[in-house]
Image (cartoon, rainbow, N blue to C red):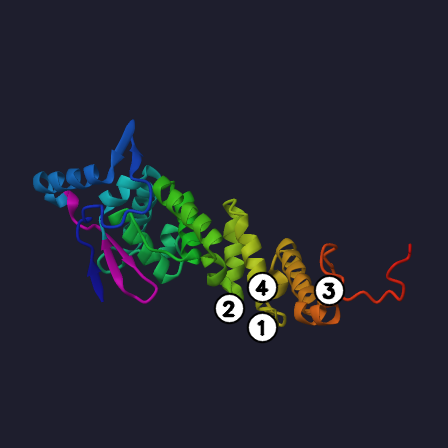
Amino acid sequence: MAMAMAPPPPPGRRFLGVATFENGGGALSLAEAWMDFLRLAQVAPTLCNADLCLELPDATTVWLHSLVVCVWSREAHDRVLRAATKNEMANGPMKSHPLKPSALGLGALSQGTIVQLVEFLYSGSVDVDAFEALELLDVAEDWCIEALRELCRSYLRFAATSGALLGRFRGAPATDMLRALSLSSKHGVGFVTGTVAAAIASDWRRLEHDPLLPQVPQACLHLAVQALARKATATLALPASLEASQNPNPNPDPKADPGPNTNPNPNPNP
């Protein structure tokens, strides 16, 4: 099944990233780039044709515009064009031999993340979860797309404080956890390690016999073991209700009524 991308839609629908990007000597808004694209389409329509065919893992093909990729960074544009040129020289027309994600350095990405990348390139925004944000951050660093880099880092910080990051990895396959740890270490997002460790600790019964668990970095496993130890200590602690029943008045108020006077000699100085 083939799917052709229309020219990029006007921004503003839900732009979650940086509103401007560097293009040459100054900052250029995505809206200005969109208007430039439309003007160019009027005077040189062949330049604005979708000229890049990308084959997704499920064999769906998506037609893209190299000019749209060029808007975001020179590195991204050069990489895509080099891959396209090499592909056509080796295999013939792109229509019959589309680009594979691996040719663009995207071979490790899930199909969903590749689709999210295409959406970002055309709209300047994207809805992601924590794992997709880590994968897109890897692409953003590799392709030098500053707006996508800031979007992913901002989302990961938000997800860490809101609990969404822990929720994403709790119950996740060990393969996802390993990839998240690898990407977070590669790009200096250290707080992800603590979150994955907490997810491992919360799901220890399922993961303790997983053959991939020994591949988890020792620092992360150490944090997970510490979390398990704290949980075990809290479980073994005396419940507050039971403690209160055994010691009903542990901190008596010195001003409280001492009760009836049982002294046999109430008047020691007659």
Disc on the earlier residue, 4 or 1: 4
Q: Quadrant of the N terminus?
A: bottom left
The residue singled out by tag 4 in the image is 200
The residue singled out by tag 2 in the image is 171
Q: Nearer the viewer, mark 1 or mark 3?
A: 3
Q: Is residue 130 visible?
A: yes
What's under tag 3, amino acid-wise?
A: Asn
Query: Are the residues tagged 4 and 3 within 8 Å (C-beta)?
Result: no
What's under tag 1, amino acid-wise?
A: Arg
Query: Are the residues tagged 4 and 2 within 8 Å (C-beta)?
Result: no
Query: Are the residues tagged 4 and 1 within 8 Å (C-beta)?
Result: no
Disc on the earlier residue, 1 or 3: 1
Query: Are the residues tagged 1 and 2 within 8 Å (C-beta)?
Result: yes
Q: Quadrant of the C terminus?
A: bottom right
Query: For the view shown, which residue lies furthest in the right direction?
Result: 269
Identify the residue at image location x=50%, y=45%. Answer: 187
Residue 249: which numbered mark, if any?
3
Identify the residue at image location x=16%, y=43%. Answer: 47
The residue singled out by tag 1 in the image is 206
Disc on the earlier residue, 2 or 3: 2
Label 4, label 1: how far apart the Cα atoms are: 9 Å
